[in-house]
Image (tube, grey):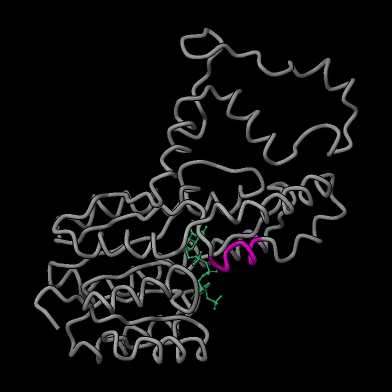
Amino acid sequence: MSNTSKTVLITGATAGIGRMTALHLAKLGHHVIASGRKVAELAKLKTEAQGLGTLDTLVLDVTSKESIDAAVAAVTELTGGKGLDVLVNNAGFGVLGPTSEIDDAEMRRQYETNVFGLMAVTRAFLPQMRARRAGRIINVSSVGGRITLPFFGVYNSTKYAVESLSDALRYELRPFGIDVTLIEPGVIRTNFEATAVGNLSQFDATPYAGAVAKYEQMSKTADRFASNPIVIAKAIARAVNARRPAARYVAPRSTNFALLMSALLPTRVWDWAMRKVAFLNPKTLGVDGAALADATPAFPVTRVHGSPNAQPRASAN
Ligand SMILES: NC(=O)c1ccc[n+]([C@@H]2O[C@H](COP(=O)([O-])OP(=O)(O)OC[C@H]3O[C@@H](n4cnc5c(N)ncnc54)[C@H](OP(=O)(O)O)[C@@H]3O)[C@@H](O)[C@H]2O)c1
């Protein structure tokens, strides 16, 4: 291993972005500790990494305190007491559904992994980094941590939380020599989509059933626009290898277009586009269109920039 080789622990490395990142970083000469819940998948990953580089595996469920404590002990042993150079908080998932119809239990489940799990793992590995006055925390957020998509309100809100927590950690940990970086993937071909649409029948009895069904159909065809997870593995590698990493890495680059549009378009135009992509119209929702027409001005009412009607985007705050 070279002098620039770092010990990197990745959460959620049994699939998708985490798995690809584990193999990519091992290939680049880093000592990878790939963690996840599925023992069989970890074993397959270890076999695949043979001959590529150094890759250890570790069982870690980010929602379990016992599991996190055991992981810290195992990492301390694996690194001869030194601890991690880099922690990649990647474990996460989203469940698609109308925001008002997702119940508390489902909402909490996403927060437990994406927000509380990420923070618990971070807290557990920080003391060793702080003591060494060195370390790096890389949080896998999403472009959905900066723009909200219809039916992804709950998931997106977990990533907005990750963005905010990461910003605060970046200010607070820099004096200890610890960098905090966000990775903001666009649409990536992984198991994410299958998990997200796994239980859509739970919304069959809601007013959104028709729109959700159409959206699911559309998202299947949209899969061909999804990027290979190597794009994100490379962005994470840039964040691992940089002398001073950036605060945010957006990947693939085309994702910047969505961010730009969301910043430039007046709220009403953006909202219209969001309703359009998610089939949120009176017909699909079974709403009386004539009654609605009296209450809601038709698009477009807003003139573009400089218009006295233009309102600041609420999500930009
Ligand atoms: N794919 C996209 O389009 C996309 C876009 C933006 C952001 N992201 C983010 O990228 C990250 C990785 O997602 P992915 O696309 O690679 O999806 P994925 O293929 O479904 O992989 C998710 C990984 O997270 C793991 N995980 C879930 N809950 C866990 C827990 N409690 N403890 C430990 N591991 C857990 C999964 O393990 P199990 O197999 O055990 O469930 C799996 O290894 C997530 O944070 C996601 O929000 C993805």
Magenta residues: mostly which secondary structure? helix
Q: In which quarter of the image is residue 173?
A: bottom left
Q: Which residue sits at x=74%, y=53%?
A: 217
Q: Which residue sits at x=63%, y=31%?
A: 273
Residue 53 screen position, x and y as percent: 26, 85
Q: Above or below — where is 207 with respect to 12?
A: above
Q: Which residue sits at x=46%, y=62%?
A: 228
Residue extending furthest left? 3
Residue extending furthest front? 224
Direction from residue 120 to residue 54 in the image, left or right:
left
Camera-nearest residue between 276 and 149: 276
The total of numbered circles placed on residues is 0
Residue 167 screen position, x and y as percent: 32, 49
The quadrant in which the C terminus is found is top left
Camera-nearest residue between 302 and 216: 216
Direction from residue 201 to residue 47 in the image, left or right:
left
Residue extending furthest top? 308
Q: Above or below — where is 207 with respect to 141?
A: above
Residue 198 screen position, x and y as percent: 70, 66
Q: Which residue sits at x=49%, y=32%?
A: 262
Camera-nearest residue between 5 and 129: 5
The quadrant in which the N terminus is found is bottom left
Residue 302 screen position, x and y as percent: 60, 14
Direction from residue 54 to residue 268 in the image, left or right:
right
Camera-nearest residue between 236 and 315: 236
Asked whether residue 238 is drawn in magenta, I would say no
Direction from residue 303 to residue 29 in the image, left or right:
left
From which residue to which does the magenta span run? 190-196
